[in-house]
Amino acid sequence: MLPVTAHKTDALYTQSIYKLMTINQKLITRGLALFIPVLFCTKLYAQNNLMKEISIGEIKQQRMGTVLDKIASKGNFYFAYNNKNIPADSMVSVAGYRGTLFSLLDKLLGDSYEFKEVPGYIVLRHAPGRLYITAEVDKEFAIVKGYVNDVSGQKAIAQASVYEKNQLVSTLTNDKGYFELKLKNPTGPLSLSVSKENYRDTALYILPVVNVDSKHNNNKNYKYYPDEGSGNGVEHSRFARFFISSKQLVQGMNLGNFFATSPYQVSLVPGLSTHGMYNSQIIDKVSYNLLGGYTAGINGVEAAGIFNINRKDVKGFQMAGIFNVVGGSLSGFEIAGIYNNVLNDASGMQVAGIGNRTHKFKGMQVAGIANRDQDASGFQMAGLFNSVKDFTGGVQVAGLFNTGQQSSGVQFAGLFNWSTGQTGSQMAGLFNVAKKVKGFQLGFLFNVADSSDHPIGIINFIKNGEKSLAISTDETWFTHLDFRSGGRVMYGLIGAGYKFGDASSKDASSKHVFDIGFGAHIINHPQFSLSSEYVVQIFTKSYQTQSFRLLTGYKLTKLLRLFAGPTFNISGSDPNDDVQIRGWELSKHISNDNITTLSIGITGGLQFVW
């Protein structure tokens, strides 16, 4: 066995090299250990920004977050940190400074914080603890064994992540701080790293002595994803956590937002894969999960028999027999037998047997039951409903209803559309509700809005629209009582009529009529008006009339209006019924089952307007 002991130093720019003592010539003929503070990036020279000389003037009582932003903007990089652990809102003062950025950060934050540099970022991490690692390398069985302890108290560190960055394998320490790590290539160089939340990272490099140079550095491509501050993530999803083991969750907490890339991975279930537990820290180009998988992300293709769970982004194509859960963003095509859930933004196409859910979607969504998004644009189709807080443009189609706060596109629903804010156009089998409508509303029963110029429905409750109750008569000598309601341009009509007269007359059985229709204001002057209407009149006897009207109006007072105008009528009746059509007959067509009559009439009356 080969025992190795390593301690973490405080200065990131200090590197210590330890030679290994010969203990067993058979096992350690080629070995040496290098202990350095781990930066979780693949190149040891990647500390350009931390070691840069900077110069700043006097700072008096400014937010630390503001100071960090100013430094980052000058250095063309970003600071990444957790607001819960970094006192970004605390006030700091500096009486001028010239020196390295590392020294300034150490002065501002103190020695309880760790600074890591990765391309484009300097990561600030609260790490007051220190780790102490001992390890044994057994090349015969391709296993690294060892212990992880706390430096200050020498207590065992449980649930610490021990991983080999190049071979992409990892494990967790047990309650006694003990670990065993199975290696894929025991003869090659080892880059053994240890991470634990609230502790500074520690790395142990074991390299062949024959050639220690950059050519033997089998580096993987590592990336850093800063926290977006939204609180999203599969670790916060109760649904996804049901399929993720507690060990994998601890691994994610320890390693944070540093991820490696790999060409492929194959897994049976989460944790049982070609990358083991380290799978949740690897972004793959090709991923195949026989039952289900839990990976850092996909930049290519992923397929699963049951489910896919990804911590970060998915780019490309993803398919699962039951469900997909993406903790980051989706760009591409995603399909699932039951459910797709993207916790952040998504663009492309989503297809699900039951439902799709995203934070912000752009593209096409198709679901057997429902689509639910915070924001969306494009095309949405659902068997039952679409629920989008802010639909910024496109088309929504639902078998039952569409709901949301804002909708800038067109909504089609079998039952109703409901928007609590501004909307584009709405079409529903029963009714539409909105606050301000820029387009039109078409609802069979009624439309409701604060402002809607073009509502098309039987009854329209438009707050700033016109409503009237009219009593009128026409060439049939029926007396009608009709209610008109609508917006600035379009309105609906519903009413009834009764024919007063001799009960013994020839057409006495046709005493009642039901009126339904819609109209449009052509001229709506404060004194004069001109409107056109299409009205269907259904009589108690088996005939009906369709009337096209052109009505002129004159306002007597603010609430009263006289109106009158010609009508063009198309009447249909049963040949067996003795129906007398009033008005000036233009033509009549008689068939075996219907008599169609074209005629001209006149109507007029008095309106009470409000």
Image: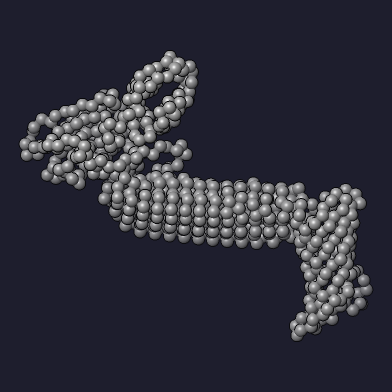
Whether residue 451 sits left or right of residue 370 in the image: it is: right
Rendered image quadrant of residue 119: top left
Residue 468 visible, this orientation: no
The residue sitting at the bottom extreme is 592
Query: Eyeballing the image, is 355 above or below 534?
Result: above
Q: Nearer the viewer, residue 482 or 591?
A: 591
Quarter containing the N terminus: top left
x, y percent for residue 401:
60, 57
Q: Where is residue 474 drawn, in percent x and y?
A: 88, 67
- The residue positioned 13% from the left and 35% from the top of the image is 209
Residue most extreme to the left: 25
Q: Residue furthest top?
A: 95
Total labels drawn: 0
Which residue is rendered at x = 37% and y = 47% of the image?
A: 297
Using the image as rendered, state which of residue 274 and residue 234 is in the foreground. 274
* Closest to the observer, 603 or 290: 603
- Percent x, y of residue 40: 30, 35
Question: In the visual, does 450 lie left or right of 391?
Answer: right
Give the x, y percent position of residue 85. Answer: 41, 29
Write down the quadrant of residue 570 in the picture. bottom right
| 536 to 382, vertically: above or below | below
Q: Residue at 69% of width from left, 61% of height from top?
A: 444
- The structure's colour scheme is one colour
Any part of residue 177 in sight? yes
Residue name at image x 28 percent, y 51 percent: 273
Vertical placement of residue 77 versus 566, above or below? above
157 lies left or right of 81 = left
- In the picture provided, is 134 more to the left or to the right than 393? left
